[in-house]
Amino acid sequence: MSRHSETLNGQHIACSPKPVHFTLKPSNFFLLFCFLFRSDRITQLQALSAWSSHRPLGASTPSSHSVRRRLHLWLIIKRIQKFNQERARAFQSLSSVSARLSCANVDALHPIHLDADETGTCMLAMMPGQKPRLVFGQTVALYTRTSGRHASSTKIQALSSASYISLQLYVPFSRGSWTSIACTQLGCPTFIQIPPNNVVFAFDTFKISRSTVELGGRTIRTLIPDAKVVEIINTLQAKAKQLHAAVKAHKAAMKTGRNREAQDASSSESDEDF
């Protein structure tokens, strides 16, 4: 700040520096809050209370509901960060196979999407269960978690934003094609629902031809992936055990994190300061 002078009766009088006022937008204040207080729980709660108090002098004290909403938002951000960090850590040993395994080849440029005709992104996923089994399927439904409820969606740009993904399974048929009659014993299609942790690799930007045939009153769909997709599938199939271990490690880390968040949330609600 520089000093300034004023004129009084023809004389220059030195004055103190003019104060400079800065305005911090609430959105930037929240980002600063998340950056400064991202480790210690007590400090987080104190900082959240201070953020709630960032209001004009004389304004009313924020309600406990408002504070809990902001704490819930903070927990969501932390959960997304933890999902990505733990996923990268769990799949680190498989980075030599593909660096994109840490995000399952899903990002803003390669989202998992669902078209109007219910044909969505094809992917390789780990079948839920104790045995390592990779399956190839096509997305038929997407769900995200909003306000504690599962809501349908048509596109997700990160695995951490999904709650569940529904797939229609395909199995090898003939001449490089895959058929939707995944259950050969019953001769019918198979659908599964998986958590986002089980997605191994999505093929949004890869070339996969689709066709539909009506046979005996049934609709049979076939997929014909190009050579690059087949190569990736074969490579990852050979690493099924390692991929299964990585998925389990990721789930275990996220379960530990959810238990800790539940304890934090219950502690914050019983805090007398709130």
Image (cartoon, grey):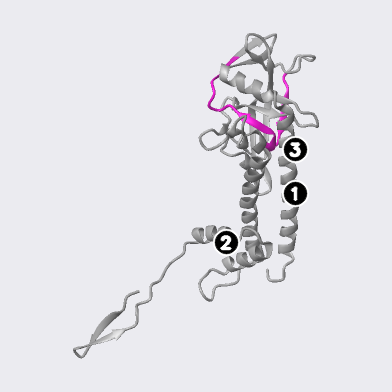
Is residue 201 within the magenta segment?
yes
* Residue occupying the far left of the picture: 10
Residue bounds of the magenta highlight: 189-211
Q: Position of residue 142 (x, y in %)?
A: 63, 34
Q: How many marks?
A: 3
Residue drawn at (72%, 68%) of the image: 271
Q: Is residue 150 left or right of residue 17?
A: right
Is residue 77 within the magenta segment?
no
Q: Position of residue 48 (x, y in %)?
A: 61, 64
Q: Is residue 17 left or right of residue 147?
A: left
Query: Residue under circle 1?
Result: 256
Residue drawn at (72%, 59%) of the image: 264
Alpha carbon separation for disc pair 3 and 2: 32 Å
Query: Residue under circle 2?
Result: 36
Q: Amino acid at mark 3?
A: Lys
- At numbered mark 1, what does the secondary structure look like: helix, strand or loop? helix
Q: Is residue 33 above or below residue 259?
A: below
Query: Residue under circle 3?
Result: 248
Alpha carbon separation for disc pair 1 and 2: 23 Å
Q: Position of residue 251 (x, y in %)?
A: 73, 41
Q: Amino acid at mark 1?
A: Thr
Q: Is residue 28 above or below residue 145?
A: below
Alpha carbon separation for disc pair 1 and 3: 12 Å
